[in-house]
Amino acid sequence: MIAAIAVAVAQVIVVGAGAPLLVGVLRTLKARLVGRRGPSPWQPYADLRKLLAKEVVVSTTTSWIFRATPYVLAATMLVASLIVPVFLARPPLAFPGDVILLMYLFLLGTFFLALAGLDAGSAFGGMGSSREVAVAALAEPTIIVAVFALAMRAETIDLARVVERFSREPLLAANPAHLLAFAAFFIVMLAETGRLPVDNPATHLELTMIHEAMVLEYSGRYLALVEWASAMKLCLFMTLLANLFFPWGAGGLTGPAAIPLGVLVLAGKLVLLVIALAVLETTVAKLRLFRVPELLAGSFALAILSVMAVVLV
């Protein structure tokens, strides 16, 4: 019991404290790739500290939803960190079908954020909310189908057992279905976390924003919580990519004693994924909004092909 609590606390700390650093490293790499010095990797921590010290300004037209949304976002991401295999194959809340609960947690945060964008009554907030819901409706089924393709090969719907199975039998990953599922999941990760080419987190043009348009009315500690939750969501999606599709080094780790080694293995995988994401974001342009459904439809087709490849190959 004590060991399980220690692992749970460690996972929450790693995801909660490490997510801003992941975003900071990504920003620094992107700046260096285009020839700029860029901010320090630790800049997100300074930004969060500055926002926490600022006064909160709330419109008189908003309801309790606007105030509750930042806390819901942070809480759902922290609970999700207990379901995702972070540095150990078996997370504290592992159970058969846990991916369903994980997707519901992501959708719960998206739902409240969309309501908060509408609650403020601004034109840009409503526009961003409608776009976010449309993207989520196309992206979430792809995640389920892509993970289902992995579950079919691992013969289990438990995320922890999927990681353990692929870690024990690496040849299972040497399959076209695995590559197709990875491509589908990677595209959906870009959409769900608001990265290029679906969205541009660094833009200041309201007409092209999706996620940023919904949080325009937030300030102070509310904005800090929203930004922190966004960083944790990116960290969790990249962790799923790292451990579901490249589980080597994590599948055999169990118990609190393996936490330091698991953190190092995860850090190495995330560094490689961050480099790949930085290169991608510096080489592609943002898609026009009406082209985003085509991209997500393509990712869903890849996920379906992955399932078909598992059945046929």
Image: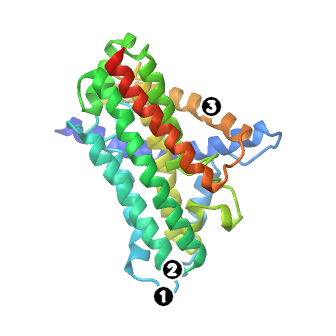
What is the secondary structure assignment of the residue under circle 1?
loop
Image-quadrant location for residue 208: bottom right
Q: Residue at x 33, y 25 (%)?
A: 163
Q: Residue at x 35, y 21 (%)?
A: 310
Q: Nearer the viewer, residue 219 or 287?
A: 287
Image coords of residue 313 (percent x, y): 36, 14
Three-letter code for the amino acid on which mark 1 is drawn: Thr
The answer to whether mark 1 and mark 2 are in CB contact below 8 A is yes
Q: CA distance from mark 1 to mark 2?
A: 6 Å
What number is the disc on residue 120? 2
Q: For the residue carrying disc 2, how many other residues have a C-alpha within 10 Å: few (<14), some (14-19), or many (20+)?
A: many
Q: Earlier in the sequence, mark 1 or mark 3?
A: 1
Image coords of residue 241 (percent x, y): 46, 33
Decide: is 121 above or below 45: below
What is the secondary structure assignment of the residue under circle 2?
loop
In this picture, residue 117 sits left or right of residue 160: right
Q: CA distance from mark 1 to mark 3?
A: 43 Å
Quadrant of the frame with the N terminus: top left
Look at mark 3 in the image and give the residue it sits on: 276
Q: Residue at x 61, y 55 (%)?
A: 290
Q: Residue at x 24, y 32 (%)?
A: 157
Q: Nearer the viewer, residue 69 or 149?
A: 149
Image coords of residue 72 (percent x, y): 37, 64
Look at mark 1 in the image and give the residue it sits on: 61
Q: Earlier in the sequence, mark 3 or mark 2?
A: 2
